[in-house]
Amino acid sequence: MAVSAVAESVLTKYEPVIGLEVHVQLGTKTKIFCSCPVEFGAAPNTNVCPVCLGLPGALPVLSRQAVELAIDAAIALHCKVNPFSRFARKNYFYPDLPKGYQISQYDQPLAEHGYLDVLTPAGKKRIGVTRVHMEDDAGKSIHDGFKDSDRYTYVDLNRSGTPLIEIVSEPDMRSPDEAYVYLTEIKQVLQYIGVSDCDMEKGQLRCDANVSVRLRGEQKFGTKAEVKNLNSFRFLKMALQHEIERQVELIESGGKVAQETRLYNVETGRTVGMRSKEQAHDYRYFPEPDLVPLRVSEHWLHEVKNRLPELPADRRDRFMSEYGIREYDAQVLTLTRETGDYFEAAAKAAGDGKTTANWVTGDLMGLLKAAGKEISNSPVKAEHLGELVALINKGELSGKLAKDILPKMFETGEAPSVIVEREGLKQISDTGALEKIVDEVIAANPKQVEQYKAGKTAVMGFLVGQVMKASRGQANPAAVNEVLKKRLG
Ligand code: ADP
Ligand code: ZN
Ligand code: MG
């Protein structure tokens, strides 16, 4: 970990400004311009064809599924989808790019002018999304792992032609934490609507960060550096932290931040200069002549929109208003689509969303976590959890008994009524049955009964406790109170 020479007080004089460029691999079955399968971990250079190998004369054909997933993402990010967009060639030479250019959208992207609301510790914050555009991925250079890796680099072109979207944010983030929650939210929402699995370890979610600092109160942005190679959420935060400190330190010691691309080094925890503005590539962009422009009709857009599930942020708001649950719980319950579906099914069976929310976020999630299980294969069915809540609400089970029953439901997968029946755990509210127990307790505790009769009403708590104990926790406490009072005069 890098230890900075700048003091905290100096750091707080400055305000960081951060904008992210996020690449997301679309979850299509096939590549963006050919029908080769997209498959992680296949034997090298097996999922290839003349198109994605960049052989002369091969022609690309745009995948409809890729466009639809990109539109899904654009809608989720509240972007305006352009009726007309087009692809361009971004020319550069690299061994894992056999065509000699990447096909990307440049001057006319698929979608623009969006935003994403994120929950920061300081409250809700809106981060602007400048644009969402489509492009193809390059292959992979493999620098180690072979016995002659000291002399050779190997190239695997299975990834070549994998569909990506790039999501460019406005420079709206003001701390590494905000960048972290923004990226987290992107991941959540895109997973939720099924655009991508967003598995960072598989490279399905990649992030470059643009960072600058300025004196607080200053309107003008400082010169930015672009930090690459941030392939985990933790690295994003650490790299930003380090880069902010580096820039502040530089400015404080009379230097100037250079506009450049920097690489985050995981080992040292530092960023190092990779190329300056002067060394920046000239990509010689020009419209891709082998592809027709992409037209998205009103009709098509409408169709895609209609297929989209309710977005997590909308669902979160609806949960709060429809079921009266707290923002935090609504957030937890909409983290994944499966959690939201489970909760709604359970709430319906219970006829009580608020209590159900507590059981899902509390006891059930605790049991799932301890067992290393996902809610989508919870041994407790949503309907059964709802039934448990309903039994409490009907006064047939005390909350305490219910807490004992849930783990048994988790173990056996049985309905609560089945367990209650078998173990005879029904709450006793029946006065006749209670009177019998109360009389036994009164007979066994003459001293306390005397005290009560002498005016020491606090002993009541003790007597109720004795009845509860005698009933193995099954007595309804309110009913016990009543019967005891009646019996003691
Ligand atoms: P470039 O011309 O280098 O591509 P852009 O203006 O297109 O720069 O912005 C690229 C990314 O950098 C965007 O995510 C944007 O929000 C961010 N960005 C732009 N200016 C700054 C700045 N001064 N500080 C931090 N981030 C910035
Ligand atoms: Zn192919
Ligand atoms: Mg730019």
Image (cartoon, rainbow, N blue to C red):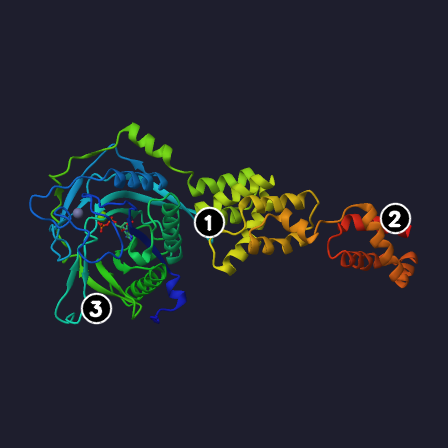
Determine if residue 209 is in view.
no
Residue depicted at 30% across the width and 63% down the height: 243
User: What is the secondary structure assignment of the residue under circle 2?
Assistant: helix
Which residue carries the number 1 mark? 376
Please state which of residues 191 and 13 is positioned toward the viewer in this rendering. Answer: 191
In front: mark 2 or mark 1? Answer: 1
Q: Is residue 137 left or right of residue 441?
A: left
Residue depicted at 54% across the width and 38% down the height: 321
Which residue carries the number 3 mark? 145
The reply to whether discs 1 and 3 touch (Cβ–Cβ < 8 Å) is no
Q: If you read the primary sequence from the N terminus, does the residue marked by circle 2 or circle 3 appear first?
A: 3
- Above-or-below relation of 386 to 217: above
What amino acid is found at the position of numbered circle 2 in the picture?
Answer: Lys
What amino acid is found at the position of numbered circle 3 in the picture?
Answer: Gly
User: What is the secondary structure assignment of the residue under circle 3?
Assistant: loop
Q: Is residue 412 left or right of residue 195?
A: right
Q: Residues within 10 Å of mark 3 (few under 14, many from 20)?
A: few
Residue depicted at 54% across the width and 57% down the height: 367
Position in image of residue 173 (x %, y %)? 36, 52
Which residue carries the number 2 mark? 486
Q: How many marks?
A: 3
User: What is the secondary structure assignment of the residue under circle 1?
Assistant: helix
